[in-house]
Image (cartoon, rainbow, N blue to C red):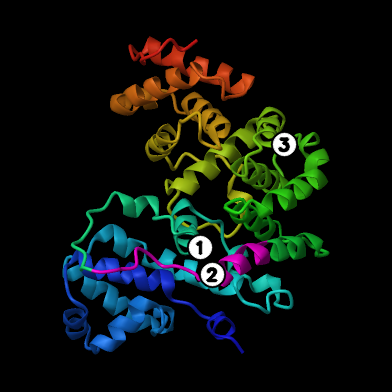
């Protein structure tokens, strides 16, 4: 049995590294933190390295540790992410398990709840080494000299297993008598992050099997977000046309437009409670305002972004549904105007995106907000 096989069932990489960042935000040494928590330095070190998964700590003790860290001045943004980090570790452990082909997919952590942006970022932090967006904006603590890990990192073998097993899970989820749509679509979504490009052909094949469904969407169904995840993954792999086709043909009524906005709001955390499945998407939801979603979309309004057409459509739908949102946030509105006119000066978007973005620019001008560039 290899070290890889022994470590697969449980992991603590993400939670451990997050705990390290939390400790440094106070700041405390490992020995000082151990004294605060009533454990020795070796225990803290093993938590932070992932050798002793923090997931194995009894729930009551974990709650007390979190409370103690908060009372000592730990960064609240990092503390708030501990639960997501633990879930990321559970998902990673399941996805690199060499026995995944025989495992019961009904208990797969990836299919137990709808992913959020933060949770996805934490998973990909370990897989790709990309620092999560919410961590990038935080103050960087003083680093010791010498080589220091910059995040949780899977070994090369585990990284390959991660993407290979996503394909396995997606195929198994689709082949069941009662398909696990959530597991399938989230496996496809994460597979779209494969930097090697090996997932591109597999995703294209998956999309080809579903293409006929897009034309038959008369309203929202559980297959709608499934198709959306596949085409966004293809866009991330360099093929934007399926996504553009989906935007043009798979939003036939208000239910689909609500689904797009509710899902986006959930993704960025405006709907704060975890959703066990996709059924919340088409519901009428007035519990979120759209401020965070607006900022998220504007920050990603870039002609080179793989989802630029989707971001434009969601912006157009958001500003149509939440009139006055830009007026309440003029700084974001000015950034939107600048980005929008720059994109209109390029040739990197679809005809529909150009029409929707032009509509946004004209609406901004009525608010007295103009961007730099011609906005042709």
Discs 1, 2 touching: Cβ within 8 Å: yes
Mark 2, residue position: 92
Q: Residue 287 at x, y = what percent?
A: 44, 43
Q: Residues within 10 Å of mark 3 (few under 14, many from 20)?
A: some
Mark 3, residue position: 219
Q: On the picture, is 323 further left or further right than 5?
A: left
User: Which range of residues does the magenta coloring cover?
Assistant: 146-166
For the residues labelled 3 and 2, the Cα–Cα distance comes to 34 Å
Q: Residues within 10 Å of mark 2 (few under 14, many from 20)?
A: many
Numbered mark located on residue 127 in the image: 1
Label whose residue precedes the other's in the sequence (1 or 2): 2
Q: Secondary structure at mark 1?
A: helix
Instruction: From this view, report whether residue 8 is shown above or below residue 374.
Output: below
Label whose residue precedes the other's in the sequence (1 or 3): 1
Front in this rendered view, residue 161 or 175: 161
Q: Residues within 10 Å of mark 1 (few under 14, many from 20)?
A: many
Front in this rendered view, residue 265 or 41: 41
Numbered mark located on residue 315 in the image: none
Front in this rendered view, residue 10 or 155: 155
């Amino acid at each position: 049995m290899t070290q890889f096989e022994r470590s697969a069932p449980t992991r603590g990489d993400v939670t451990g590294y997050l705990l390290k960042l939390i400790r440094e935000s106070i700041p405390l040494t490992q020995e000082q933190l151990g004294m605060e928590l009533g454990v020795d330095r070796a225990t803290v070190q093993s938590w932070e390295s992932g050798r002793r998964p923090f997931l194995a700590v009894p729930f009551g003790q974990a709650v007390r540790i979190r409370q103690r860290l908060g009372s000592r001045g730990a960064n609240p943004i990092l503390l708030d992410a501990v639960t997501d980090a633990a879930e990321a570790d559970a998902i990673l452990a399941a996805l690199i398990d060499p026995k995944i082909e025989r495992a019961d997919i009904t208990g797969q952590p990836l299919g137990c709840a709808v992913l959020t942006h933060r949770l996805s970022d934490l998973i990909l932090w370990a897989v790709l080494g990309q620092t999560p967006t919410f961590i990038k904006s935080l103050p960087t603590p003083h680093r010791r000299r010498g080589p220091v890990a910059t995040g949780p990192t899977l070994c090369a073998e585990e990284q390959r297993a991660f993407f290979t097993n996503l394909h396995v899970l997606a195929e198994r989820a689709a082949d069941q008598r009662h398909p696990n749509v959530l597991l399938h679509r989230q496996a496809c979504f994460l597979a779209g992050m494969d930097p090697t490009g090996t997932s591109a052909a597999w995703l294209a094949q998956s999309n080809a099997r579903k293409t006929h469904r897009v034309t038959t969407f008369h309203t929202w169904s559980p297959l709608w977000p499934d198709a959306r995840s596949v085409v966004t993954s293809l866009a991330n792999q360099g093929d934007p046309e399926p996504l553009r086709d989906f935007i043009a043909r798979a939003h036939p009524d208000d239910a689909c437009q609500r689904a797009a906005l509710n899902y986006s709001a959930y993704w960025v955390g405006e709907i704060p409670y975890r959703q066990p499945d996709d059924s919340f998407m088409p519901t009428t939801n007035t519990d979120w305002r759209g401020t965070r979603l607006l900022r998220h979309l504007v920050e990603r309004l870039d002609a080179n972004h793989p989802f630029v057409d989707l971001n434009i459509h969601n912006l157009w739908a958001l500003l149509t549904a939440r009139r006055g949102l830009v007026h309440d946030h003029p700084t974001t509105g000015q950034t939107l105007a600048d980005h929008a006119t720059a994109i209109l000066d390029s040739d990197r978007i679809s005809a529909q995106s150009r029409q929707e973005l032009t509509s946004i620019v004209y609406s901004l001008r009525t608010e007295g907000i103009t961007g730099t560039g011609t906005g042709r």
